[in-house]
Amino acid sequence: MVDPTLINALQAKAMGTVDAEIGPRPSDLTVRLSHIDDLLVAAEVLIKQYTMALATLVATDETAMPDGDFKVRYVFEPTTANAPDWFVTLLVSVDAACPEVPSLTTMIPAANWHEREMCDLFGIVPVGHPDPRPLVVHDGWPKGVFPLRKAFDGSQRVPVEPAEEFPHMVTEGEGVFEIPVGPIHAGIIEPGHFRFTSVGETVLLLDARLFYTHRGLEKRMEGISPLDAFCIAERICGVCSVAHGLGYCEALEQIAGVDIPYRARLIRGIALELERLYNHIGDVGNVCAGAAFHYGTATGARLKERLQQMNERIAGNRFLRGIIIPGGVRLDLTSHLLEFISSTLLQTLTDFDSLMDRIEANPSVVERFDDTGILQNQTAMDLAVAGVAARASGVNRDARRDHPHGAFANADSPQLNVMTASAGDAMARVMVRAQEVRESIRLVDEFIRRLKPGPIKIAIADPLPGDRIGISAIESPRGEAVHWLRTDANGRVDRYHLRSPSYHNWPAVALAAETAIVPDFPLVNKSFELCYSCTDR
Amino acid sequence: MTGDKPLGIVLIEMCILVILGPLVTGIIQKIKARLQNRQGAGILQPYFDLIKLLGKGTVQADTASGFFRSIPVLVLATTVAAGALVPVVQSGPPAFPLGDALMLLGLLALARFLTAVGALDAGGAFGGMGASREMTIAPLVEPVLMMVVFSTALAVGSTELGILAEQRGTSWILAWRAADFLGLAAMLVLLPAETGRIPVDNPDTHLELTMLHEGMLLEHSGPGLGCMLLASHTRQIVTLGLAAALFFPIGPVGAGVTGLLLGLCTFALKILVLAVYLALIESSYAKLRLFQVPQYLGIGFVLALMSLALRIL
C-alpha cells in the first residue's frame, strides 16, 4: 500500500536523515525527519508532488520520556478522489529548552490555526508565522503557562492577568467602519466574536475569534482510561455526538487491536447516517432562516424534530448518545425499531423532497442563495476545507469512501455516491446537502437490509496496550473529523487530539463572507453551519 | 376645506387605531404561522408583549444621551397623531382644519427620522447600521407614496383623506380608470416596505446583521421598547388605513350610531383583507438582497409615475 517513491522523493530533497516506518495503521507511513528544517521541503513534496493536504497536526510533550523532547506530528492525507486510504505523518523532534519549529503556514494555509494552537497550548513557537496572535487562550490567561504540557496541573486554577484589548485584524480608511458581533448572540447559538470591517455594506475583512467554549477536554482525558475517556469524546459536541464517539472508538479499537462484529458496524453506520440526516435537514431549514424564507425554516425545524424524536426512541437520547461504545454498540436495533426507522425515513424523504421543490421553485429564495458567499475551489484546497463546504466547491472527498469506517469498513458495504457541485456558493452547499440527505436515506435502507443476527459488541481488556497510536477519520455531518489517540506505558490516555471539520472550515467562512455584503453574512454562515464546541474543545 | 365630522369622532377613530394596531400584527403573525404549518401564538400576543414590557425596568447604553429616553415617547406621539388623520368610522373631512394625506405622510416620516436619530444616539453598531439602511430605503418609499396620493387627489381635487375616502366610497370598481389600478398596484408594492415586512424587511428575525427597522430598536428596553413597538403597530394600521381610504371602494358609511358601527365593521374588513395580503406575501417570498430593494421599489415608482401621468394627460 505504501508508495515507495514517496520515501525516495523525500530523501532526495532532505538535508538530514529520513527514517520511514509503517504506522500508525498498516497502510500509513510515519517519516522521522532528523533535521527540523527539512520539514518545509518534505511538506512541499507531499503537497505539490503528491497533492496531499494537512489532515491534522498533533504536538506531544515527551519531556518525561527517554527522548526528553516535544514531538510534532504533521499528518497528511491524499486529496484526490478514490486515493488509497493512508496518512503520511511527518514527525519532528523539538528541543524542550528552545521549542521552535519553522512555520508551514505561508506554504500551507491550513496549518495556520494548528500552529497558533500549538503555540498557545504547548509553547512551541512556529517561527515565521504570519499571524502569531493567540488563538485558543483568551485575554487574561497568564503568559508562559502552557496547559497541554505534562507539567501543567489541569485541576488547578490559574491566576488571571490584566490583559490589553485583543488586536483584531481590521483595516482603516475613509468611510471604513467596524462592526463587532458577539460573542453573545441573539438566538440559541454558541459564542464566537466576529469583527467585520466594512465600507457601506461591503465586507472588507472578517476576523472571527472563537474558542470561547474551550473546556480543555483533551487535557482532561489525559491520564484516565481510554474506555472512560470515551464519555468525554462523545460529549465534545452535541450535534456531532455519534461521529465523535465513533471516531474515538475506532482509534481506540486500533490500539486494542480488536475487530468489531459485522452487526455492530452496520448499526454504527445507521447511527452515523441518522445523525447526518437530522443535521442536514435542520441545516437546510436554517439556511432558509438566513434568507428569511419562513416556510423553509419552519418545515426544516419540523422535519428535524421528527427525526430527533425518532432518535430518542432508538437510543433514549435525541442526539443518539450512548448508542456507540468502545467495542461495538450498546443498543441493538430490534425488527420493530427498524420498521419504525424505515417508515419515518420514508415519510421524511417525501416531506423533504416537497420542501426542496418549494425552495428550488421559488425565485426569491434561489436568487438569495445563488452567488452568495463563494468559496473558490483553490481556496478550499489550500485551507483543506472538509465536508459539504468542500464538496460544494468541487473537492471530491468524503471520508466514508476515502477512509472507510463504521459500516463502510465491511467488505460488502454499499457504494457511496459522493455528491459534488462546482459553484461554491450557498446554493451549491444547499444542493449538496439535499442530495446527501437522499443518499443517507438510501444508505440506511441498504444497511438495514444487510443486518444479520449476531453479536453487537466485543469486550476490550482494560488496561489497553501501552505506547500505541490510533488514528481515524470520520465523515461527520460537517465533514471529515480526524481523531488521534495515543496511550502511555500504562495503557492510559497520553494524548488525544480531535481535528474537527469546523476547525478547518471556519477560516473559509471568513473568506466566503468577504465576497458578500454584511446583511448576507448570516446566510453565508448558515450555509456552512459549523460547530463552535467541536472547534474549541 | 372643512366638513361636518366632529372632534369626538376624530378622537374615537384615533383611539380605535391605537387599540387595534397590535391586533393586526397578531392576526398577521397567526396567518403566517398557519401557512407554515405551525400553531403560532394567539392573536392577542402583541398585547401581552406590550403589557410585559411596560412592567419592566429600563437599561440604557452608557453612550446614549438624555435625548435617547424621550425618543420612544416622541415616536409614539408622532405616529398616534398621524392616526388622527385616517378616516375610520366616518368619511368626509373633519369640522375643523386638521391636516391632509401629506401631513400624514410627513408625520410618519418624522417618526422614522426620530427612530433613526435614537438608534444613532445610542451608539451601537447595529443601531447605526439599521438607521443607515432605513434612511437608504425611506427616500425611495416616501416620495412614491406621495405620488400615489397625488394620483388619487388629482381626480378628486383635494388631498384631504376624508374627502378622498368619501369619493372612493361612491366610485365602484367598474368606474375605475387605468390610473386607479396602477395606483393600487403601486400601493401594494409599497405596503410591505412601509410596514417593514418581507420582501424588504423581516420583523421576525433575530439576526442583527440583516435588520433594518428592528436594528433601530435594539438599544431600547422596557417601557421605551414597548412604546416603540406600539408605534410600529400603529404605524402599520395607519399605513393600511391610508391604503384603504385611497383605494377600497366600500367607503365609510352613514351617520348615527348604526352608521358608525357599520363604518367600523367595513374598516375592520378592509384592514383584514390587507393584513391577509401582507401575510401571504411574507410567507411566499424570501427577503430581497439589500441591494435589490431599490429595484423592487423602482417597480412601485414606475407604477405610481404612470398612474400620475395618466391623470395629468
Image (cartoon, grey):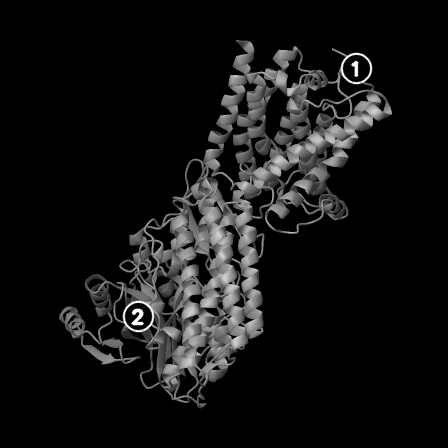
Total labels drawn: 2
Looking at the picture, does residue B183 appear above or below residue A224? Answer: above
Looking at the picture, does residue B71 appear above or below residue A84? Answer: above
Which quadrant is the N terminus of chain A positioned in? bottom left
Q: Are marks 2 and 1 on the same chain?
A: no
State the SS at label 2. strand
Q: Which quadrant of the view contains residue A462?
A: bottom left
C-alpha gap between disc 2 and disc 1: 85 Å
Camera-nearest residue between B121 and A423 = A423
State the SS at label 1. loop
Residue shown at 44% from the left, 60% from the top: A437
Residue A483 in picture, x, y percent from top left:
39, 73
Residue B219 seen in the current view: no
Residue B66 in picture, x, y percent from top left:
68, 37
Residue position for label 1: B96
Residue shown at 51% from the left, 60% from the top: A348
Residue B292 seen in the current view: yes
Amino acid at circle 1:
Phe
